Image: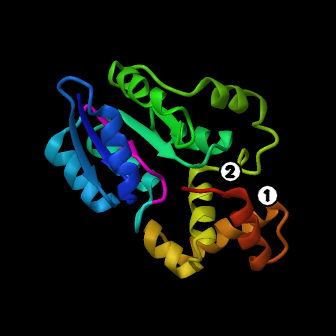
Amino acid sequence: MRVLIVDDHPVVVSGCKALLAAEPGAEIFAAGDAETGFAAFCAHQPDVCVLDINLPGLSGFDLAQRILKHDPEAKLVVFSMNDDPAFAARAIQAGARGYIAKNDDPLLFLPALKRVCAGETWLPAELARKMAFARAQSPLSGLSAREVEILRLLAAGDDIGGIADKLGVSAKTIANNCTALKAKLGARSSMDLMRAAIEALRSPH
């Protein structure tokens, strides 16, 4: 099994490698950002790619879209500290075949990758249950993947111009998205929207 891990935290990468070390024939590659992650994917053609969402520069969502455009059959697993069920749902909608929260049982990591490699999907049972019952309660449940990404960038401190540059769209488009987000999240001002973004995306790594 060839595994690519894209995460900017060396301790996380080391932990993943340790969890896979006993697997016969496992080949493990690593990258710390989306650009080197995409290059590594093209170079190594891994059986499964493990992506963090919050990467330097382009996000894991952006990397997932780029990889899937290059290879629609790519098997992607999102590995994140955020266990919000709506956030996991967005990852699945973005093309991931599995979602693992970093506070899950480490013993689930290898079985999850094996299942995704076999063409199946993986969600921890508790997260799947939360996704089934908490859709209406989550502040992210009514948002598109693009809107969730804009919230992530707002919470990280980016302004409209910076978000537009990162997402490759016009500032006017982002401003319109922010207006829609204010209505959806009940924010009356840009500052309210930023506070809402930070609250909605608490524990983002």
Decide if residue 132 is on the left or right side of residue 65: right
Name the residue at the left extreme. Answer: 43
Is residue 103 visible in this depiction of the protein? yes
Whether residue 180 is visible here, answered yes or no, is: no
Question: Distance of mark 2 from mark 1, alpha carbons?
Answer: 8 Å
Q: In this view, does 69 lie above or below 200?
A: above
User: Was residue 51 drawn as part of the magenta stretch in this picture?
Assistant: yes
Q: What stretch is highlighted in magenta?
A: 47-54
* Residue 9, x across and y down, in percent: 40, 58
Closer to the camera in the image, 20 or 156: 20
Residue drawn at (17%, 26%), measured in percent from left and top? 25
Is residue 14 inside the magenta stretch? Answer: no
Nearer to me, 112 or 149: 112
Q: Which mark is residue 184?
A: 1
Q: Which residue is drawn at 46% across and 42% down?
A: 78
Mark 2 belongs to which amino acid? Leu
**In this picture, is 93 found above or below 25?**
below
Q: Are marks 2 and 1 in contact (CB under 8 Å)?
A: yes
183 lies above or below 103: below
**Pick the front one: 59 or 183:** 59
Q: Name the residue under label 2.
A: 143
Image quadrant occupied by the N terminus: top left
Residue at 43% x, 53% y is 60
N-terminal of the pair, mark 2 or mark 1, is 2
Label 1 CA crowd tier, 10 Å (few <14, some 14–19, many 20+) = few
Amino acid carrying mark 1 in the image: Lys
Q: In which quarter of the image is residue 157?
A: bottom right
